[in-house]
Amino acid sequence: MYEIRFHGRGGQGAVMAAQTLAEAAVLQGFHAQAFPYFGAERRGAPVKAFTRIDEKRISLKSQIYKPDMLVILDGGLPDIEPIADGLRPEGKAVVNTTLRPEEYDLGISVDCVTVDATTIAYEKLKAPIVNTAILGAIAKADDIVSLDHVLQAIKDKFGEKLGERAGVLNAEAAKTAYDTCIEGRCKGERPLVQKATWLPPWEEIPPGTALPVANMGEVVVGPGSSWQNLTGTWRIQSPMYKKDKCVRCLRCWWSCPEGTIKRQEDDYMRWDYRYCKGCGVCANICPASAIEMKKGAREW
Amino acid sequence: MVTKVISADHAVAWAVRLARAEVVPAFPITPQTLIMELISEFINDGEMDAELIPAESEHSVMSVAVGASAGGVRTFTASASQGLALMHEMLYAAPQNRLPVVMVNVNRSLGAAAGIWLEHNDSMPERESGWLQCYVEDNQESLDMVLQAYRIAEDIQVMLPTMVCLDGFVLSHTVERVEIPGQEDVDAFLPKFKPMNVLDTESPKVFNPIVPPDYVVEMRYQLDWAMDSAREVIEKVDKEFGARFGRSYGGLFERYRMEDAEYALITLGTATTTARAAVDELRAQGKKAGLIKLRFMRPFPEKELVEATEGLRALGVFDRSIAMNRYGPVFTEVRGALASTDLPLTDHIGGLGGRDLTLEDMRAIYSIIGRSAESRPERCVFWHSLRGEQR
């Protein structure tokens, strides 16, 4: 059995990547399963997805804790989550980053393929949806599935969902990634991030599903606790505001799902980049093209 | 204290008034409607200070009840049959949020095979929901149990919603002698509701958020544990009620002529009354028959029933509903509780859809149990008053 764990952000397509890899494995004659795990369905929130591949019928329905391969759709995730936890020492990593493997510190040194999937996705798809590019790098990292089967699965799956043209473009993104990714070995120098958790025994959970403002260990819960959750760290593209074009219609202001757009006295806007997660809703809804999404976590 | 000759529905309305419930969301359904009619009269006449909120459906009724209880006020509602079924989704909001709403369900069969008459197939499926659930035998007990239900539900050890089930028509529309306790006595027995969590802008809390898998196991266990601790609160409240009002009901269940009994029947609700008559007859004939009136389906008195049935040679269970293709739900519970014993058990299905349950039926039931003490019965489930042969 070969187990792959994907780490990405809501909107990057980790779930589709896991499913497409399973399809490629089935095209190759294997049994396969793929499934997601996510919390509240928020664009930009860390998500996990899993793919299992085996020669025989798969007899597990649980999550993957000791993966043979780790696929990281946002190279910055290990800064905030203990991504590499459980990765087998003989396992492999596939990372979307501009760094070379030997420059990338995953926290565990393993065979690694790095690829600038974000640039490829912007070029081929005009959006930071990196799932298909990363699939090309997966085919390079391990021959468990061949590139041909990966490309076929992408054309089938994305073609069926988004139209034939989208299928072809996404397959091209994968092929480009396969050709340009870099093989090597990543660094294992930094410790895994320790996340503060609150996992109390049952007696210590406040009864009645009602949480007051409180410190539970190192975790703040209850009303107002989201201040500690700097959703700005989720951002891989950033809204740039062109004040001269703004017609002060306020649509961006009331559409922002995180409330990060601050309305000024004169009805012009200001962005709170500590919490802006770069979802692009504001740019999409603006009738005056006064907001443009720019690649990367930037501020103006 | 005054004595009145009133129906169980009206006895319930009196209890709600005496309990000083402050919010009463309602939607009419026979045979519950008499309760809400009298409550609305009390409010109209200035005899009760409460908001009666007519909602557009039972689903909304339970939503209002949950909201009112979270607002920190004593809340009452009542329903039956299809109405309770429509509430099903919202019933689950009350227990985990620890909102001690009290509801009376006037048992009525859940269609199809639509009807307005008595069956327990409306309330029995809801015993999984986290509500305490008790069944009463007469009109006085209907009144008394609503008062007790608030004390039990609002006890800090419990803080769970409670459903008092009473038999449609056999109680709801039958008048009997009922003692109405004095307001001062009730006030002394039932202090003002002290909620566990309150919607309060001065002390904000997050209520009922999405709960990730990291916490749900512990929260469910907490709820299960709270329901289990309700067993001792039920016994305590019943004793205290008895000391104050001179009436007590045995808590989780009542034993009738069980001291030296060799065989016995477990009943719920009004079937108990007719079973008492059958037991008295058998005792007069020198036969050692006994009766257990099960009062609570949740919490279910497993340990207590094992102890109460020790020494019996046969036990029957009366069920006024059938879990299709299996047994009556009470039988399933009792058999689970007595799994470690080799007591012969029989299930007696009767009185479905309002079919009258007669003394003759009860005699037949006891006769089968008596026989099963001597030799293994030919089957486990017996349908009573069924026309045609049971196959």
Image: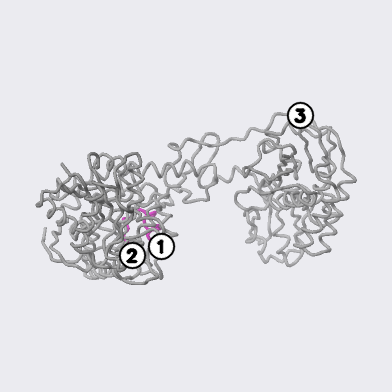
Give the residue drawn at x 22%, y 39%.
B311
Both marks 3 and 1 on one chain: no
SS assignment for the magenta stretch, majority: helix
- Asked if marks 1 and 2 touch (Cβ < 8 Å), the reply is yes
Q: Nearer the viewer, residue B186 or B126?
A: B126
Which class describes the residues within 10 Å of circle 1: few (<14), some (14-19), or many (20+)?
A: some
Which class describes the residues within 10 Å of circle 3: few (<14), some (14-19), or many (20+)?
A: some
| Chain to which the residue tagged by mark 2 belongs | B
The relative height of residue A20 versus residue B361 in the rendered view (above or below) is above
Is B6 included in the stretch rendered in magenta? no
What residue is pinned by disc 2? B79
Question: In the image, residue B122 lies at what x, y percent?
Answer: 36, 62
Magenta range: B59-78
Q: Which quarter of the figure has residue A193?
A: top right
What residue is pinned by disc 1? B87
What residue is pinned by disc 3? A188
**Helix, strand or loop under label 1:** helix
The mark closer to the camera, 3 or 2, is: 2
**Helix, strand or loop under label 2:** strand
Query: Marks 3/2: CA distance?
Result: 64 Å
Both marks 3 and 2 on one chain: no
The relative height of residue A248 versus residue B327 in the rendered view (above or below) is below
Disc 2 residue type (three-letter): Ser
Q: Is residue A191 left or right of residue B255?
A: right
**Helix, strand or loop under label 3:** loop
Disc 1 residue type (three-letter): Met
The mark closer to the camera, 3 or 1, is: 1
Query: Marks 1/2: CA distance?
Result: 9 Å
Q: In this view, does A16 lie to the left or right of B311?
A: right
Q: Is residue B76 left or right of residue A36?
A: left
